[in-house]
Amino acid sequence: MSSELEYQNLVLEKATSEQARITNRNSYMSWGYPQLTIDEYIEHTEPTIFSQCETYKLKALITLSSGQIQEVIGYYITSLFTPAQYRHKGYATKFMKLLNHKLRFECKAKFSYLYSVVGSDFYSRLDWRIFPHKEIKFKVDNRFSTSLKHSELIVAINQSNIETIINKDCLNVFEVEISERTESLPYLSLYADDDDNVDWILIEKYSWF
């Protein structure tokens, strides 16, 4: 007979997507065979994803109506996608409404923003407003030259140091805005941390009795 000591390190956890696929493979012979192939069974037991997107959490500066500058949290929304068979059925609209509520009230976001490739009508119906934005682009020359003055102080930007450089620039912007109280945009994104990247999906919720 088993004792409680044998169970003391056991815990109940919500299965990840990969673990759910393993459990489906484990139960196939009992619950799926021979009516379904294993691929059909796994597809049948996986949730249907009606719509999906990604978000990135941002630290940002906003200018209040009083002129005060405040550091807040915002979210960048990207990669909104609805499979072809579920388009024009209202799923993306419902998804964005739920996401808006979650970011605003649960994640305490002061704003969210996105770039649209489908025009402005869809998002404007969901209370996102269009703002003009300024963009600065730099042409990057792959031929790195060391002929400049004080070339020993020049460091090429690459994947290993770009995050550090961006964070330093963001802190410099923050210090200038706070110290000089200069006129600023409605919001100014500082940086996004890859650890704060979240994939969101819209699925059907079942109730069990």
Image (cartoon, rainbow, N blue to C red):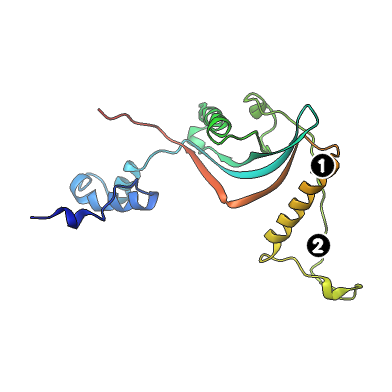
**Residue drawn 57% across the image and 34% down it:** 103
Which residue has dot 1 on it? 134
Crowdedness of circle 1 by 10 Å Cα count: few (<14), some, many (20+)?
Answer: few
Left or right, residue 30 beside residue 193: left
Query: Front-most of 139 and 32?
Result: 139
Query: Front-most of 138 and 178?
Result: 178
Secondary structure state at the residue bearing disc 2: loop
Tell me where residue 11 appears, x and y as whole percent: 28, 50
Secondary structure state at the residue bearing disc 1: loop
Q: How many angstroms separate mark 2 from mark 1 (CA)?
A: 19 Å
Q: Is residue 126 above or below residue 83?
A: above
**Residue drawn 16% across the image and 53% down it:** 4
Query: Front-most of 192 and 46?
Result: 192
- Asked whether the residues under the numbered discs 2 and 1 touch, taking CB atoms below 8 Å apart as contact, a structural biologist would say no
Tell me where residue 33 appears, x and y as whole percent: 21, 48
The single residue placed furthest to the left in the displayed view is: 1
Tell me where residue 88 appears, x and y as whole percent: 54, 28
Q: In which quarter of the image is the C terminus?
A: top left
**Residue drawn 59% across the image and 53% down it:** 194
**Residue drawn 52% across the image and 44% down it:** 199
Between disc 2 and disc 1, whose residue precedes? 1
**Amino acid type at image mark 2:** Val
The single residue placed furthest to the right in the displayed view is: 149
Q: Which mark is residue 98?
A: none
Which circle, 2 or 1, is nearer the viewer?
1
Image quarter of residue 56: top right
Q: In which quarter of the image is the N terminus?
A: bottom left
Tell me where residue 92 appears, x and y as whole percent: 54, 31
Left or right, residue 112 beside residue 22: right
Crowdedness of circle 2 by 10 Å Cα count: few (<14), some, many (20+)?
Answer: few
Which residue has dot 2 on it? 140
